[in-house]
Image (cartoon, rainbow, N blue to C red):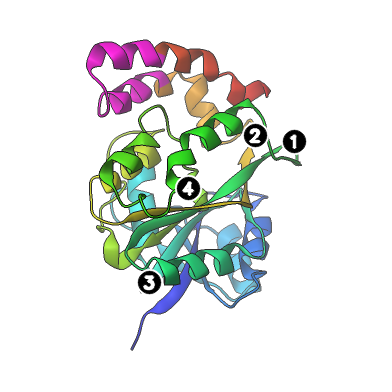
Amino acid sequence: MSKVLHTFVVLAYKESDLLEECIKSVLNQTIKTNVVIATSTPNDFITKLAKKYNLEIKVNKGKKGIGYDFDFASNCVDSELVTISHQDDIYDSTYAEEVITQYKKYPKATILFTDYYEIRNNKKVKTNTNLKIKRILLFPLRLKLLCNRKFIKRCALRLGNAICCPAVTFVTNNTPKEKFACDLKCNIDWYCWEKLSKKKGYFIFIPKKLMGHRIHEESTTTEIIGERIRTKEDYLMLCKFWPKKIAKFINKFYVKAENSNKSE
């Protein structure tokens, strides 16, 4: 039996009022795609939504933690392409179609990802300082003929994590099963991109805003920033690209930028 071409794996956690909106967005694609729910916190709330939309639930009974949950989500289906959908984010109707079109052009890609907009207070924010900086960092990856080069891929990562995790689709045959597994709490996605940047394959950037990443007070990212864990993790990641003294210097600017997640 051949693999499914593309699957949205909706990663659900506890009881989120935003989960249904995410599910609706991935079911409302211009082309048919597979959708399942993955969770390490099974409960009646998730079960009822799964039944309502006739979706299978995959339960992670292994090691718990954000990175391990992400790896479980990326490996729990037999699919050529997997998008890990965070339960509070949404996807435009053409997301899957655009990703599949690019995959057919670049089958040796490791990841394909789109641009995105933020959702703040239920309003779409298509540009702000944070998004502008990320788009500048991603500019080298617009050169499709060069985006399989290790140097170019790492250029897009060496000053920060410019790739939005829920905007990413993984090519399962070209990526290892363990991508996120680590004990980091905040920078597991940056850790993954750095790991993949050293492997053969293309980083395919689709410069269209095709999904919305929600920023709100209850998000895991905001909680982590509040705990100041991110400062330490940013430094650890920067050290993978720079000598320690330079990494420390760059990290000072990160401390100032953290407030953007709360106020901008």
Residue 105 percent across, percent down from the top left: 43, 69
Alpha carbon separation for disc pair 2 and 3: 32 Å
The residues bearing labels 4 and 1 have C-alpha atoms spaced at a distance of 31 Å
Disc number at residue 216?
2
Task: Report crowding for label 2: few under 14, some 14 to 19, many 20 or more residues within 10 A (C-alpha).
Answer: some
Extreme bottom residue here? 1
| Residue 249 position (above or below residue 237) | above
Question: What SS does tag 3 mark?
Answer: strand
State which region is magenta.
231-251
**Which badge, 2 or 3, is on the more N-terminal residue?**
3
At numbered mark 4, what does the secondary structure look like: helix, strand or loop? helix
Q: Which SS class for mark 1?
A: loop
Asked whether residue 212 is in view, the answer is yes
Residue 192 percent location from the top left of the image: 32, 44
Residue 181 in view here? no
First-in-chain label (4 vs 1): 1
